[in-house]
Image (cartoon, grey):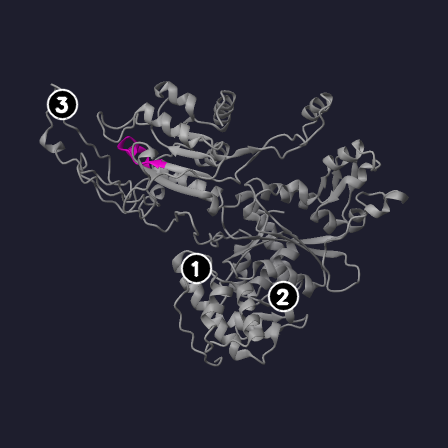
Amino acid sequence: MDFKRKYFDPVAAGGVKLKDGSVAFGTGANSYVFAEKVILALNIALATKRPLLVSGEPGSGKSTLAASIAAILDRWYYRHVVTSRTQAAELLWTFDTLKRLNDANSDVQDLLSKQCYVDPGVLWWAFNPATAEQRGSTPLAEGEQRYRAADPGISSSAKPHDQVVVLLDEIDKADPDVPNDLLDPFDRKTFTVRETNDSIHPVRDALLLLTTNGERELPPAFLRRCVTVVLDPPTEHWFVEIADRKFGVKDQALHVSVARAVKSLRDVAKSSGVRPPGTAEYLDAVEVCKELEITPDSKVWGQATQAVLWKRDEPPVLAIPAEPRP
Amino acid sequence: MTAFSALLRTFAELEPGDAEARTAAGEMLGVFSTTAIPAAPSVGAWKPTLSEGGTSPGSSMPLPTLPADPEQPRRQPELAASAGVRSRLTVVSRGKAVLEIPDWARQPDQPLWPVVSSPVTPAVKPLFAPLRRRGILFAIVSTLVEEGEVDLERAVDQLSTGAGLRKLPRSPIATTRRGVQVLVDQGSGLDPFRDDQRQVVLALDDLLSDDRFEVRYFRGCPSRGVYAVGDESARAWRAPSPKTPILMLTDLGLGGPLFEDDVASTGEWLAFAARASEGGRAILALVPYEARRWPRALSRAMRLVHWSERTSVGEVRRALRDARRGGLA
């Protein structure tokens, strides 16, 4: 695809362009192979300042995408896993009313200022980490400095960043109204902590990534506000490329063998209607085989495969030839 | 920024140089709607998909084929509700009156008039309009959890007694996290509503997580046994987890032919409702017949909602609120 990689260019950041146009980037845990359409989607999301909604089969690399983007763009990275209990407001802040009440009734603990009971959410940290650390726009009192909040963000470098990547993982787990509700604080960015009447203004720019497993339909209004991209199912080549990046090419033949096993198991899993093993399981299997010196010829290969890749009672019957990578 | 202006901005900034990149950009921004978010493969509970056959837009999901009663030939449920209206007349032999059945009606599985085959059957207007369906179903299957704002009034009340607070009272909020068990009535009284049943099941599938969504089919009353898709024979009905609502798409035996074996008595329904509501489960039924025809005893045992074109979200909420006030879960 021919387009300007104006905002996101993994090749310029040191990635290697592969034959199919995808780009392999990084080594170790943050290695990732970016398909061309993912690079396009990211450029669109950054150009239009819209959230990027990532969908695709389990194991296609949805959740690991955000960390790799943060590494390439050299941004702080925040992650929040959405559950069926998640409410949009908690992404900004929560207030520990019960602890405050408990402190008020305690003979031991002094009642602290209200600010100490404010717990900043992931979007507050993303927009304005300095105020999040102080739990408000004004610094905590001298005697309450020990109640400063800890930044949950992750950064590959120590330097301060004025841009961040925020991942809201598995948005389809939340109740139907939550997706729309959470885009509102993301759009407005400025918000007021109700309990302390404290206004918080953004000082950082955030790229919001959301992932969905397609477990339930997302509201049309929400989809309209997002840039959407569907990740392709992982291929053997994709698995091997990830393993080569993470572990090096020394044991490439093993990477290929395990990739074949995963591919076969994915096919069996899909036809059986169970969750197929993904990238995480593949990398676990490669690591296990390396550490325990297990190969497809080993007697324990079947047991190891079942334990790390299949994870079900009945072992699948698979014949995995150990051939070198073409 | 509208999707179109976002596309213009994308073209200006990223200068897509080929049709593939331009088309992909349009799809990603929702301007060209050719890319759908794929649904995850079904795991665990049966999940209907749009690719499972059917000819009309409303009949895209097949119902399961139920086994015939060995003692009495029984019509199989249609796989697609596109073959016209079927009818069956029953001879009453135990009383004095015997119905004279004309020859044309002696073949119960034949439609009353020739079916003109057509590649696409016109969709019947659904009972729940698509724009309201999601809101209505959310109101029906959502349950209340006390996880909203702190309920100061209740907190002050409790503190005023001097007993202290063991748990901070919070206002209730609606959630679908508990999922739902859907029980679909296959009785012949529901024949005119097969498409509506399918549409409700599909809409619920979109609304709920796969692992919290279970669909079973029954005749008469679920306590007689239920079927999942692909089942050869009926299995005993099993209650879902405590507090998981149970939604029935049923006519409570109000429709269909007289003297139908499949019709369960009010007592049988009441026994089922009593058993199903153990564990704090809300029992709801969408009934396509007017409230004045509902057995009064059942109205007190389960939440009945009129399934009609006139049903609104507000009406459903009022009905459910009234049921709660009446002591139902």
Q: CA distance from mark 2 to mark 3?
A: 83 Å
Q: Residue A182: horizontal and vertical position, in percent?
A: 63, 43
Q: Residues within 10 Å of mark 3 (few under 14, many from 20)?
A: few
**Side of B281 where B52 appears, left or right:** left
> Which is closer to the viewer, label 2 or label 3?
3
Residue B43, percent across and down?
44, 52
Residue type at mark 1: give it: Asp
Residue B276 horizontal/vertical position (percent):
42, 32
* Label at residue A4: 2
Work out whether mark 1 precedes mark 2 in sequence or the reverse, and give the earlier one.
Answer: 2
Q: The residue tagged with tag 1: helix, strand or loop?
A: loop
Contact, CB < 8 Å: mark 3 with mark 1?
A: no
Real-space CA distance between mark 3 and mark 1, rounded to the nearest whole angstrom: 55 Å
Residue pointed to by mark 1: A313
Q: Quadrant of residue B274?
A: top left
> Is residue B40 something that shows in the picture?
yes
Mark 3, residue position: B94
Task: Name the kind of residue labelled 3 in the image.
Answer: Arg
- Tag 2 secondary structure: loop
- Tag 1, which chain? A
Name the kind of residue labelled 2 in the image.
Answer: Lys
Label 2: how many residues lie within 10 Å, few (<14), some (14-19) or many (20+)?
Answer: some
- Where does the magenta region start and end? B184-194
Q: The residue marked by circle 2 belongs to what chain?
A: A
Give the x, y percent position of residue A154. 72, 59
Q: Is residue B86 above or below residue A139?
A: above
Residue extending farthest to the right is A142
User: What kind of element bears circle 3?
Assistant: loop
